Image (tube, rainbow, N blue to C red):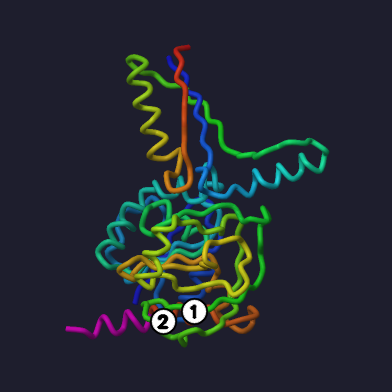
Amino acid sequence: MFQAEIKITLKKTVADPQGLTVKHALESLDFKGINGIRMGKFIIVQLEAKDQAQAEVEVSSMCQKLLANPIIEEFSFEVKKI
Amino acid sequence: MKFGVVVFPGSNCDQDCFYAVNDLLKQPVEYIWHKTTKLDQFEAIILPGGFSYGDYLRTGAIARFSPIMEAVIKYARSGGLVIGICNGFQILLEAGLLPGAMLRNTSLHFICKYVELKVENTATPFTSEYKPGQRVRIPIAHNEGNYYIDAKGLRSLKDNQQIVFRYTANPNGSIDDIAGIVNQEGNVLGMMPHPERSSEKDLGSSDGYLVFTSMLKWLKQKSIKP
């Protein structure tokens, strides 16, 4: 079995109101020098696949079809055998 | 003229839309469960507001793959009238029937209040009963109404007169104050404000009702053509 750890964030060109609000909150707690905060989603998928390559193809397809919206989001992932 | 109101798990404005068509517009209307795959008997389809599939993953992202949506996409591509209100708009975006995407409101708050809109385009099947530039009061109720489209897409929306409603005081960060758009062909409308909630005076405003009378007018004109 394989396990994919998928990270989805808003594209750099898209404003992230959540990230901005959290940044302001940290600054109000006196954390200094924060240059930026981006919020996103972390998704763990466990799946059966023939090999690592096939698992990666599957996960990439999942991200493109459903898990991320390519208009506003970008994704990255790591697949491990477990 | 038979209207259909699609019901997804989590839709909650379906009854309001049904009421606006049945009790006010006096037209036949039916609920369409999301597992249905045929829409042949309908002249107009309404995707109502709500929280389909709990808004999990992204608003509209799961509903977009409901069995009914394949039929809605086919229906829209063949020229049928489709209106998506609030969550319905979000579903139309996820389905690719309208361009762009929704982000969270810049305030991060769920906003539920009357807003003023400017009618930007009255040459659509949904807005012909309004006057060009008319200011109307229609309520919004959403957490993700911050419409986003890239610069190229925005130019294309403007060039094709696809922006139908704009906020006069932007409540949610939406790009270019956009509150509602149509597709290039003009037969699919998505809008965040709720016309069904402002379709009779007792509700505080009847400004939204003209969306429904415009649709009826368009359908009647279409049906008398040879």
Question: Dot 1: few (<14), some (14–19), or many (≥20) neighbours within 10 Å?
Answer: many
In the rendered image, which quarter is residue A67 located in? top left
- Label for residue B8? none
Left or right, B29 with respect to B42, comes to: right
Residue lying at 40% horizontally and 33% vertically, measured from the top left: A62
Left-right relation of B215 to B53: left
Q: Are marks 2 and 1 in contact (CB under 8 Å)?
A: yes
Image quadrant containing the N terminus of chain A: top left
Q: Is residue B55 left or right of residue A25?
A: left
Instruction: Give the x, y percent position of residue A19.
Output: 65, 43
Can you give x and y, in whole percent of width and height, for residue B112 in the image?
66, 64
Q: Which residues are magenta?
A: B216-226
Secondary structure predominantly adopted by residues drawn in magenta? helix
Number of callouts in the render?
A: 2
Q: CA separation, marks 2 and 1?
A: 7 Å
Residue shown at 44%/44% (left/top)?
A69
Residue B115, percent across and down? Answer: 62, 73
Residue assigned mark 1: B119
A28, B55: nearer the viewer? A28
Q: Quadrant of residue A81?
A: top left
The question of residue B225 being in magenta is answered with: yes
- The residue singled out by tag 2 in the image is B122
